Structure formats: structure tokens, C-alpha cells
Image: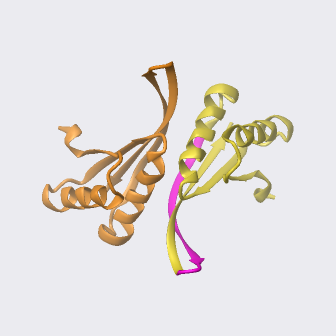
Chain colours: A yellow, B orange
Amino acid sequence: MAEENVIFVGKKPTMNYVLAIVTQFNNNSTSRIVIKARGKAISKAVDIAEITRHKFIQDAKYDEIKLDTESLQGEKGESNVSSIEIVLTR
Amino acid sequence: MAEENVIFVGKKPTMNYVLAIVTQFNNNSTSRIVIKARGKAISKAVDIAEITRHKFIQDAKYDEIKLDTESLQGEKGESNVSSIEIVLTR
């Protein structure tokens, strides 16, 4: 059930993710959404969280911000990538 | 005095910043370093913090992680950019 409120940030435009989050907050009576991103998408995840808070859901707060490192299996063996987890609550 | 322990992440290679942080922790008997970045450099700031913690200063912890939005005056008028502030303590 918790997984429903997780947004994985990838290659789509920033506003797609913002609107997905705003919709979830407004329609599903969700009070907690987790934004996850890895590598270069981390900057976009921060944009998404900030735009959501400043333009759409003014009463949303950062409940928790976690940084971590994940190991990925690639063609050239294992590589490490940083990740972020931003928990928004209202 | 606090400003001495702030690292602004820009266009240099990731490891330059990591080594600057490790040096400050080891030489200056500093127990608190703030890593700041804006826009696309946010991903690099997270890499820097994670590499510092996992490879060099294992007892460093995240004291605080703050996200914010800053207004920049550019040629085309004002624009907003996201920022991150990562506080590392040991």
C-alpha cells in the first residue's frame, strides 16, 4: 500500500511528476508521498519537490530527506550510484 | 568563521570536492562541513557527500539536509533554481 505513494523520477518532463504528485495529494486523500531518484535525476527530484511545495501544495512539508548509495549491475560490472528519497507530507 | 566550512559545488570534478572535504575534516579539526549546490550540481553534491561518507570519513553523518528555491537574476529576467544544503558532521 505504501508503494502506491512512491514516485520514481526518470526521463519524463519535470511537470509530469509534479502533476502526478499534486493529483495524488488532492484525489487520494494521501498525506505522504515519497519521491525517489538516482544519479542525474536527483536534481530533477529536488526541482519536483520544490515546485510542488511552492506552486501547488503550499502546506506540504519535508518529513524526511535521505541520501544513499546503490550498487547497480551494468555491462562493465558493478557500479555505484547515489540516490535520494524525499518524503513529502501535508 | 562558519563560512570556512562551506563547500560550494560547481563545475570541478567530483573528487576535487571530496578531497577538499576530507582534508578539512582531517587537518582543521572541523566537525561540521556544509555542502551547497544549485540546479544540476545538486546530483554532484549528493555524490560528493556519499563518496565522502562511504570511502573516506566513515563516521561522518548527515546532520541536516535542506532543500530550497533561489531566485536568480539572469539576462531574461528572474528565474528560479532549486538548491540543496547538506550538513556533514563527525
Q: Residue furthest bottom?
A: A77
Residue drawn at x 48%, y 52% is B43
**Residue A9: horizontal and vertical position, in percent?**
66, 52
**Residue B12: horizontal and vertical position, in percent?**
32, 51
Quadrant in which the N terminus of chain A appears: bottom right
Q: Residue furthest top?
A: B77
Q: Residue furthest front?
A: B75
Residue B62 is inside the magenta segment: no
Which quadrant of the view contains residue B72? Answer: top left
In the rendered image of this protein, does residue A9 appear above or below residue B26?
Answer: above
**Residue A77: horizontal and vertical position, in percent?**
53, 82
Q: Nearer the viewer, residue B70 or A62?
A: B70
Q: Main secondary structure of the magenta part?
A: strand
Residue A67 is inside the magenta segment: yes
Q: Nearer the viewer, residue A17 or A6?
A: A17
Give the magenta-colored segment's residue range. Answer: A62-76
Residue drawn at x 39%, y 69% is B54
Q: Nearer the viewer, residue A32 or B37?
A: B37
Quadrant in which the C terminus of chain A appears: top right
**Residue B22: horizontal and vertical position, in percent?**
24, 61
Total tally of numbered discs in the picture = 0
Q: Residue furthest left?
A: B27
In the rendered image of this protein, does residue B90 appear above or below residue B66?
Answer: below
